[in-house]
Image: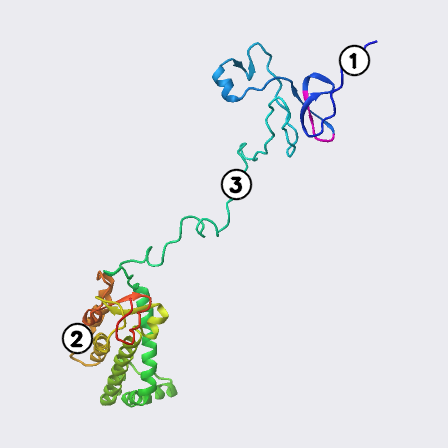
Amino acid sequence: MTDGPATPPRPDRAGWFDDPENSEQLRYFDGILWTDHVTPRRTIWSPSEAASDGSTVGGSTAGEQPAAPHSYPPVGHSSDGPFGYPPVQRRDDRAGRPPHTHQQGPHSGGGHYGPPAQQWGQVGNGPTIADGTPLASVGARIGAWILDSLITWTLGLILGGYLLWRGLGNYPDIVAEALRSGVVPDTAALADQIRFDLPWMGAFAVLQMLIGVGYHTVFLSRSGATPGKQIAGISVRRVDRAGVLSAADALRRSMLRPVLWLFTYTPLLSLFALPLSIMDALLGLWDPKRQTLHDKLGGTVVVRGRQPRPTRDGATPR
């Protein structure tokens, strides 16, 4: 009596091995048990070899029946058995693409998502002066002007409130009488009744002008920016150089607006003062350097950021 075919030894690792039940095929051993994953026992051609040989038909060699599709083991098991069977690779669920490689967070590749961040002052900052300093926007200048006007008017009312009250003449009395009687006189009758005290009103206007000139001169010659401009993040400098203005430059620049405001209360001069005030405000909208009339008088421009303070020897740091 002869013995049957020898049973292959039990593998000591996971992989493709001779099927103990069928010598014509291979079976996958998961390291503990034989699985149901089988494949015909034959040599596997690589795609490049098969394409160059030209002897494959329907994925099998000439003269052979097409082999059954490979039945790979479950994902996670190694497939490094004999006969050149390729290892099982984990595939991405999307269209069989290779596994996605996650990029590192924002601290990799220069510290930014996407292209490197642009430096402040290089993108979307509008026109600049000759040395590349970005000019202040019109919106920032208007906001600074509103803040500074509120401050100077408050100072004027505190220091010159008595002058303004005396300058109103009988106007407060007429308003109080109208409130008591409930009868509001028409415009013509009201104009005939009101008597302003022009000397007192003029004194208040002059005081307001001096406060405005002094306010802008002091701050521009000390820090290059008034409180309103500091809040808006802008400052004033000369066109030809950076740094805080001299007292003379600051005074020359600061005089035009308060003087025009004063002249609007003078009957004859108001015909010229009002158009000049409007021109002064609108010139910066189309001027290449966004200079208003008072900027041109002072040889100045309004730029973003602060101005460097002069050193003790009088030099402006670069």
> Mark 1 and 3 residues: CB-CB less than 8 Å, in contact?
no
Res 299 quadrant in image: bottom left
On the rendered structure, is 28 left or right of 113?
Answer: right
Identify the mark at residue 4; answer none if there is no mark.
Answer: 1
Instruction: Tell me residue 145's x, y (percent).
Output: 31, 72
Separation of marks 2 and 1 at Cα, in angstroms: 126 Å
Dot 3, crowdedness within 10 Å: few (<14), some or many (≥20)? few
Amino acid residing under circle 1? Gly
In the image, 318 versus 303, the foreground residue is: 318
Q: Is residue 262 above or below residue 66?
A: below
Residue 136 rendering spot, x and y as whole percentages: 30, 64
Q: Which residues are magenta?
A: 26-32
Total numbered badges shown on the rendered structure = 3
Q: Nearer the viewer, residue 296 or 24?
A: 24
Residue shown at 35% from the left, 68% from the top:
232
Magenta segment includes 78: no
